[in-house]
Image: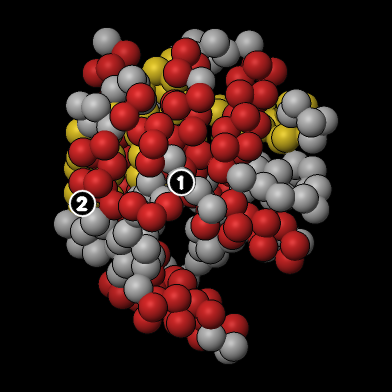
Amino acid sequence: MSESMAVAGDGVAVAYQVGGVAGGDPLVLLAGQSNSHHWWDGVREDFEGRFRTITLDYRGTGASDKPDEPYTTRGFAADVVAVLDALGVARAHVYGTSMGGRVAQWLAADHPERVGALVLGCTSPGGAHGHERSAEVRRALAQRDQRAAGRALLELMYTPEWLATHRGPFQTVGDPAMPAFARRRHFAASAGHDAWDVLPAIGAPTLVVHGTDDLFNPAANAPLLGSRIPEAKVELIPGARHAYFEEFRSVAGPLVSDFLAAVAG
């Protein structure tokens, strides 16, 4: 896998990584909130036999610049376009999970000519129409005991059976090198997302994937997105929590890969 830098419209340097089949259809993989491209470690290879995979470190994470200024999911989508431009990629499939799914919504709405097929995983339209996590979940994540809060996050990501047999490191719980201000900026970007009004304009073939037991981003958001985006297909993975793509990769990987391959023809 190679790594390079793109320059966004405001001059921020955005690190990106390329792997997979050099001549394959390009596939952008978008990580969750406060995470770098390492979110996809151990899963990326599921797509590298068919696609040219592209990831990036959001501003504030990884090797990208970390300006202390407001971030938005729409702005992150513009950073993705800067990466595609740097690579000379006119059009790519896009698979976004969690906050990455929010970014992907804006990418498909604002830059329809750049998106082939769209996969939205464990995500939400945001705003007044999105289904928010419960007060109980919010309290568990906000408790003063950081070890307990960290454990609560892991239990929202993975089932007890998975956690009993996997000791980490867990790449889905945040970039450990992020400055505290960047974490706050990411949280605000995700919390401020609201793409409800533009979803009906998305023309890309769309697959919505969610775990039925996801309480971090409630599974009720999946049919909501599916009903809002024209002709979107919805797939629920029984028993899966937020990190369905990792724990249930034997189901999720082929599901997504086959959908993308079918769209590509």
- Is there CB contact under 8 Å for labels 2 and 1? no
Residue in the foreground of this view, choosing between 121 and 47: 121
Q: Secondary structure at mark 1?
A: loop
- The reply, left or right, for residue 2 in relation to residue 213 is right
The x, y position of residue 174, in whole percent, is 59, 60
Label 2: how many Cα within 10 Å (few below 14, some 14–19, many 20+): some
For residue 188, what is the image quadrant? Answer: bottom right
- Position of the N terminus, as image quadrant, is top right
The x, y position of residue 27, in whole percent, is 46, 25
Relative to 181, is 210 above or below? above
Nearest to N terminus: mark 2 or mark 1: 1
- Asked whether the viewer can see residue 218, the reply is yes
- Residue pointed to by mark 1: 194
Q: Amino acid at mark 1?
A: Asp
For residue 264, what is the image quadrant? Answer: top left
- Residue pointed to by mark 2: 237
Inter-mark Cα distance, 2 to 1: 25 Å
For residue 215, what is the image quadrant? Answer: bottom left
State which mark lies toward you, 2 or 1.
1
Q: Secondary structure at mark 2?
A: strand
- Asked whether the viewer can see residue 52, the reply is no
Residue in the foreground of this view, choosing between 208 and 4: 208
The x, y position of residue 243, in whole percent, is 38, 57
Relative to 264, is 151 above or below? below
- The reply, left or right, for residue 141 in relation to residue 162 is right
Give the residue displayed 70% in from the left and 44% down from the top: 59
Give the residue displayed 63% in from the left and 11% down from the top: 88
Residue in the foreground of this view, choosing between 162 and 187: 187
Give the residue displayed 38% in from the left and 55% down from the top: 128
The x, y position of residue 190, in whole percent, is 53, 53
Give the residue displayed 29% in from the left and 52% down from the top: 221
- Position of the C terminus, as image quadrant, is top left
